[in-house]
Image (tube, rainbow, N blue to C red):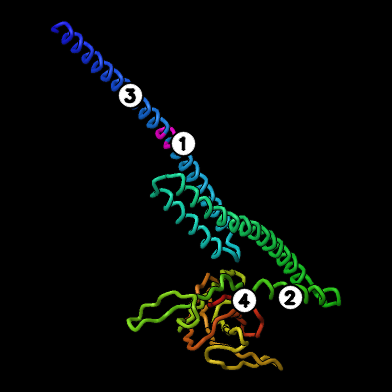
Amino acid sequence: MELNQSNSRNSGLKVVVLILVLLLMGTLAYVYKLQQDKDAVDSSLSKTLTEKEKFQAELESKIAEYDVAIADNTALKGELEEEQAKIMELLEKIKKSDGSVAELSKYKTQYVKLKREMDNLIAENNVLKANNSKLTKNLDSTNVVLTNAKTANDTLAAKNENLSKTVEKAQRLSVLNLTTLAVKQKSSGKQINTDKASKADVLKIGFTIAENQVAKTGDRTYYVQVIDSKNNVLGEKKTETFGTTYLPYSFQKIIKYENKTVQVQEDLSVKNITSGTYFVNVFDKKGELVSKSSFQLK
């Protein structure tokens, strides 16, 4: 009987040892798996940080490219500065981000849109720069001709006429970035953005008058016309006459221009407006359309 009890104890001990061995092997396998996962995460994180650094370097390069274009001092200087500010803002967001794949993907999507706008602006800026250079050379050449000329003739008269048109065109101011934002005016004075016509009681209209060193300084008058989906003119509904043409407008804006970029902002009070597409037009003091845009309210 004692022999049987001894065998039973030995068998139980073997089972316990076997169980402990299995547990140890399982633990070792689990630790190995954790180490592999950690190595994979570290590798992924290292790669993500590298992508983040490359992205930051690319944005810094684009900001420098904007600096070069802005230094050209063309009529697009104001618009170039605005787009550069967007790139700089995106760069700050990336610097503060955790560098995750999801965040980098989101910011790269934003960058693609900004880069497309940048490429268009840079191309347009290069054209303006070339045109300005050509215009300057033409003006210098014509001034030499006028200084040395003693007798007017048909050829000179034609040149003078063309020069006059060229200078007049060069002196025209560019109106850019015409935007309209519908807001709800609170009694506290706070304004809340809205895309619903039933809630809108103020339309915030803004545009930029670009820098132009050739243009004359002084007051410039602009007539802003806001038309709803039913072809009704909103706002003051006053009328200005240009020869035989009558221009109904929403409000008039007089700007003091000194050859520098000017940001223009005006709040137009509205009520009981309906949903649909709205059109915003800006006319100069001669009644010529210089900018237009549209927006929609639900």
Q: Is residue 190 magenta?
A: no
> What predominant SS class does the magenta segment belong to?
helix
Q: Name the foreground residue: 289 vs 198.
A: 198
Rendered position, 273 above or below 35: below
Q: Measure the alpha-carbon separation of dots 4 and 2.
A: 24 Å
Q: Nearer the viewer, mark 3 or mark 1?
A: 3
Q: Earlier in the sequence, mark 3 or mark 4?
A: 3
Give the residue at x 55% y 64%: 79
The quadrant holding residue 208 is bottom right
Q: Nearer the viewer, mark 2 or mark 1?
A: 1
Residue type (three-letter) at the residue carrying disc 3: Gly
Q: Label 2, on which residue?
A: 165
Q: Nearer the viewer, mark 4 or mark 2?
A: 4
Q: Nearer the viewer, mark 2 or mark 3?
A: 3
Residue 85: x and y in percent read: 48, 59
The disc label shown at residue 26, or none: 3
